Image: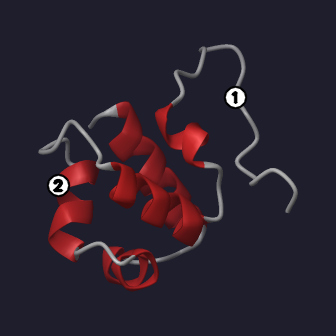
Amino acid sequence: MTALGTRVKILREAKRWTQQELASKSGISVTTISRYENARVAMFSAKALDGLASALEVDPGLLIVKISATREPSLERNGS
């Protein structure tokens, strides 16, 4: 699983959503979400990144920033 795919899956599961629910809320197909989560796609389009971040209520940067092993950033969207 890629770092992006891992984050999407963790955030989705934290909301207790299925891939179908995330697909509905983000405008991205279930197939594409599955591919991201299972590392079958390495790159996210800007549109997909925005849709996922919006649906998951996080800053898009959280999905793409490299996280150090010692410090996890907040999963909350700034200003929420």
Instruction: Tell me what residue is drawn at x 81 percent, y 50 percent.
Output: 78
Where's residue 60, x and y in %? 56, 47
Identify whether 77 is placed above or below 26: above
* Image side of residue 78 versus residue 56, left or right: right
Q: Residues within 10 Å of mark 1 (few under 14, many from 20)?
A: few
- Label 2 SS: helix
- Res. 35 mark: 2
* Residue furthest front as drawn: 46
Residue 3: x and y in percent read 39, 32
Q: At label 2, which amino acid type do we have?
A: Arg
Q: Earlier in the sequence, mark 2 or mark 1?
A: 2
x and y percent of residue 54 in the render?
57, 66
3 or 61: which is nearer to us? 61
Q: Is residue 20 left or right of residue 29?
A: right
Rounded to the nearest whole Å, what is the CA distance between mark 2 and mark 1? Answer: 25 Å
Q: In the drawing, what numbered circle is on residue 53? A: none
Helix, strand or loop at label 1? It is loop
Q: Vertically, is 19 above or below 68?
A: below
Return the mark for residue 72.
1
x 72%, y 33%: residue: 73
Q: Residues within 10 Å of mark 2 (few under 14, many from 20)?
A: some
Image point (20%, 48%), residue name: 38
Residue 49 located left or right of residue 30: right
Q: Position of residue 8 (x, y in %)?
A: 44, 53
